[in-house]
Image (spheres, rainbow, N blue to C red):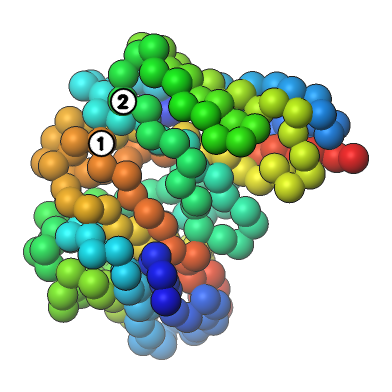
Amino acid sequence: ETGVTQTPRHLVMGMTNKKSLKCEQHLGHNAMYWYKQSAKKPLELMFVYSLEERVENNSVPSRFSPECPNSSHLFLHLHTLQPEDSALYLCASSPRLAGGGETQYFGPGTRLLVL
Amino acid sequence: EDQVTQSPEALRLQEGESSSLNCSYTVSGLRGLFWYRQDPGKGPEFLFTLYSAGEEKEKERLKATLTKKESFLHITAPKPEDSATYLCAVQAGGTASKLTFGTGTRLQVTL
């Protein structure tokens, strides 16, 4: 595997379900991100992790719970979601933080549908 | 607050018909401006990073330029395989590498 991978690629869940999205990066990067992409809207940053420590939480509802067990893996745990949470969830990684123009590389995304 | 505006929202070109996409931005302390290409149902694919006004980068039929207020993505003699949504994003100074994205330009190239 190369780059950034995400599983599953598609997910349908009911509002009472609990599911998890997985992201793995094979680039040796130290920072990882979760984004949400809804139709007709710009990508929205949800969470930022650097060396397994959460450094940013962009006012995301508590029904989304991130986990970063090591610098290569990132999870997004989902529970009691709403239909408006249906979107493409994208994971990205970059060599490091520091706001110094670091390029972020994206995975293919998980298309989530909440019924 | 950082802002990115892309225009046009959609663009239809014939094969070989060159054009430009615009990305206007307002940011405090630009650290980088990024262009990505996104195909339907896929994640954004990195194209270019520009760091300072006057900088230009090229890749095949694409050329990105940067001024203090906007960036252009020039597409020369496009082919149908260039059809995609092109996203622009900016990064300001700070401790987290937050990208602020525009809504993209959806490009369709026809034969």
Residue for point 57% across, 39% down: B86
A68 left or right of A41? left
Frontmost residue, B106 versus B49: B49
Residue A85 on image: x %, y %: 45, 65
Q: Is residue A22 above or below residue B110?
A: below
B94 left or right of B85? left
Frontmost residue, A18 versus B25: B25
Name the residue tied to disc 2: B51
Residue B101 on image: x %, y %: 42, 38
Q: Are marks 2 and 1 in contact (CB under 8 Å)?
A: yes
Residue B79 on image: x %, y %: 77, 39
Residue for point 31% across, 25% down: B51
- Distance between mark 2 and mark 1 Cα atoms: 7 Å
Q: Secondary structure at mark 1?
A: loop
Mark 1 residue crowding within 10 angstroms, few (<14) / some (14–19) / many (20+): many
Q: Secondary structure at mark 2?
A: loop
In the image, what residue type sits under mark 2? Tyr
> Quarter of the image containing the N terminus of chain A?
bottom left
Residue B94 on image: x %, y %: 14, 35
Residue for point 85% across, 32% down: B14
In the image, what residue type sits under mark 1? Gly
